[in-house]
């Protein structure tokens, strides 16, 4: 059974970037949103901290720019940083108009002003938030507005398999015209065609055994774009959030950076503070420094976790500022008003991704990338707290303007052949997928984690190549499943991470190598950019039609 869909814009991903883009396009064309699961089940929904923007009188664009540049360890491009930050306030106003329930304070004149908190790396309070569940509030508001638009079609429980380009169809142009998408409800692959295709699929932190991200963060957009022939860059910079809740029953539960921003102290098991030995900013140092410090102390002492303590603040303050964290900890028998929270670092954010310009254009005509899947040059070697949702909003706005400017001039895409399953069979060995998934995430954690060496990277690459061979055989002979699609993408992204890490002969930001512990002079610093071989990209494209 062959099913084909036609829209003006196809958005793959349903986080803050994809949803806000859809809302900005809805009045001018038909939009399809592809969501791997329920529409609100991506990383945005689980974000706790907030959105950084210059809103306070004492703050300034220059201060936010400088803080971001400092956190990025010499690899941020000032043009991209300035563009993002200067468009921040207008996007917060847009969200206010949509009704996002941001936390507010009462001003002396009786008006209610947005409450601003401060997080690591920021010189001022500039983080807008909805208590400690900003992502939940943001996602729900955007979803509710999306549901109201008749021009937006939402396809939940659908996962993209690969992009469709002119090169794959044997045409003269290599314009992106759509994607093959697995309908998880029917187990059939459907064809989605559009004038413009936008990858808003989030990051790839699920390549690691421990992560704060949901199971959907498998690097799908990065892998698909690479197979289609797009450049990717800076994949070696994987941010590990310093404080993930350490508890056998807590899966991927993040302890927000705002806890440290509001005075939380990191402690050794004996109650001694240690961050001031690693950085003068102590607990408010950028995430890469805090994560490495915790990792160092855990390994030095042979401990399984460190501790984060904010019990010196009042019970009322903790309950009002961190209701979600407070409630979850209580469920697990931890009263953060009276005792410290056990924490460990966990993979959190992919700073690299698909190369784009400031309007989200990729190397392929009519293919855009926005949000965590994109490499915009904003984050450099380390992302500063709460700049991620800001990036999603700002680049969704700029991409919407670029798409609308050219929408009428782009011809309707050519018809694509339906997905061919005539030569594949159902697998009776799903255990192969499960085993490979587990093996990949374990050796990526062990060999390509917070601290790296040449030997560890070489070991990881050998294992990745073996897995890729097995995955290709499996993919070629059996009917695809959601798990197989994600495993294929995870293996591809893991290879890109290791390749980038091998090319960087220094330690910088989130990439720390024991073989190259020094940081080059910033004047010699450069991004790690990988270019697919054209023949290989074309070959990978052809494999998609079985």
Image (cartoon, grey):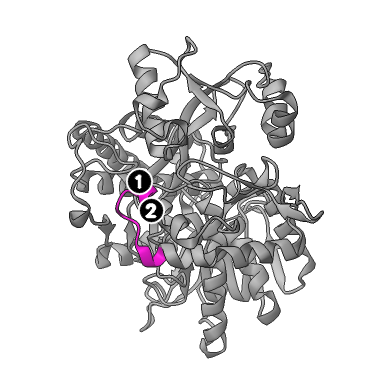
The answer to whether residue 75 is magenta is yes
Which residue appears at 56% of the width and 67% of the height?
396
Residue 199 drawn at (x, y percent): 50, 63
Which residue appears at 37% of the width and 12% of the height?
301
- Give the total of numbered labels: 2
Structural distance between the alpha carbons of marks 2 and 1: 6 Å
For this view, does 76 lie left or right of residue 124? left
Q: Dot 1 corresponds to which residue?
A: 237
Residue 449 is drawn in which quadrant? top left
Q: Dot 2 corresponds to which residue?
A: 352
Figure check: 58 above or below 146? above
Residue 184 drawn at (x, y percent): 63, 51
**Label 2, residues with CA under 10 Å away: few <14, some 14-19, many ≥20:** many
Quadrant (top left/top right/bottom left/bottom right) for the C terminus:
bottom left
**Label 1, residues with CA under 10 Å away: few <14, some 14-19, many ≥20:** many
Q: Residue 258, which numbered label?
A: none
Q: Is residue 2 visible?
A: no
For this view, does 147 lie left or right of residue 400? right
Residue range (magenta)? 70-80
Q: Tell me, yes or no, whether the two marked residues, 2 and 1, touch with CB atoms within 8 Å.
A: yes
Quadrant (top left/top right/bottom left/bottom right) for the N terminus:
bottom right
Residue 378 is drawn in which quadrant? bottom left
The answer to whether residue 111 is magenta is no
């Amino acid at each position: 059974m062959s099913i084909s869909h036609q829209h003006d814009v196809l958005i793959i991903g349903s986080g803050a970037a994809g949803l806000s883009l859809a809302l900005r396009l809805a009045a001018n064309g038909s939009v399809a949103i592809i969501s791997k699961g329920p529409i609100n089940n991506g990383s945005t929904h689980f974000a706790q901290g907030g959105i950084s923007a210059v809103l306070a009188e004492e703050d300034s664009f220059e201060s936010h720019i400088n803080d971001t540049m400092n956190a990025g360890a010499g690899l941020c491009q000032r043009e991209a940083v300035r563009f993002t930050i200067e468009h921040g306030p207008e996007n917060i106003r847009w969200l206010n108009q949509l009704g996002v329930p941001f936390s507010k304070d009462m001003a002396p004149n009786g008006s209610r002003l947005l409450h601003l908190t401060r997080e690591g790396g920021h010189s001022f309070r500039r983080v807008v938030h909805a208590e400690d569940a900003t992502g939940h509030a943001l996602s729900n508001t955007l979803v509710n507005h999306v549901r109201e638009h008749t021009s937006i079609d939402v396809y939940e429980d659908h996962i993209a398999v690969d992009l469709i380009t002119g090169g794959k169809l044997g045409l003269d142009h290599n314009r992106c015209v759509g994607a093959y998408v697995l309908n998880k409800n029917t187990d059939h692959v459907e064809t989605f065609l559009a004038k413009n295709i936008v990858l808003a699929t989030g990051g790839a932190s699920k390549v690691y055994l421990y992560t704060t991200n949901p199971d959907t963060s498998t690097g799908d957009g990065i892998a698909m774009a690479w197979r289609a022939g797009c450049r990717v860059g800076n994949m070696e910079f994987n941010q590990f959030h310093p404080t993930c809740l350490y508890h056998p029953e807590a899966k991927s539960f993040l302890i927000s950076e705002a806890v440290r921003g509001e005075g939380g102290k990191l402690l050794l098991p004996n109650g001694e503070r240690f961050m001031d030995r690693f950085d003068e900013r102590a607990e408010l140092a950028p995430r890469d420094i805090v994560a490495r410090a915790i990792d160092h102390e855990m390994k030095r002492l042979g401990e399984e976790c460190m501790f984060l303590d904010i019990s010196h603040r009042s019970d009322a303050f903790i309950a009002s500022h961190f209701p979600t964290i407070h409630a979850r900890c209580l469920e697990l028998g931890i009263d953060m008003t009276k005792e410290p929270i056990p924490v460990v670092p966990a993979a959190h954010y992919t700073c690299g991704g698909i190369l784009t310009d400031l309007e989200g254009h990729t190397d392929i005509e009519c293919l855009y990338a926005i949000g965590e899947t994109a490499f915009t040059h904003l984050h450099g070697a380390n992302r500063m707290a709460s700049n991620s949702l800001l990036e999603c909003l700002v680049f969704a706005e700029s991409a919407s303007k670029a798409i609308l400017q050219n929408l009428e001039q782009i011809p309707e895409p050519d018809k694509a052949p339906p997905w061919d399953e005539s030569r594949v069979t159902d697998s009776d060995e799903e255990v192969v997928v499960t085993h490979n998934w587990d093996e990949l995430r374990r050796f990526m954690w062990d060999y390509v984690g917070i601290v790296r060496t040449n030997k560890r990277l070489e070991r990881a690459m050998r294992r990745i190549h073996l897995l890729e061979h097995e995955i290709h055989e499996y993919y070629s002979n059996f009917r695809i499943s959601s798990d197989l699609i994600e495993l294929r993408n995870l293996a591809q992204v893991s290879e890109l991470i290791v390749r980038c890490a091998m090319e960087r002969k220094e330690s910088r930001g989130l990439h720390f190598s024991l073989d190259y512990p020094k940081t080059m002079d910033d004047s010699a610093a450069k991004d790690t950019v990988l270019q697919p071989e054209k023949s290989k990209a074309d070959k990978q494209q052809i494999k998609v039609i079985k």
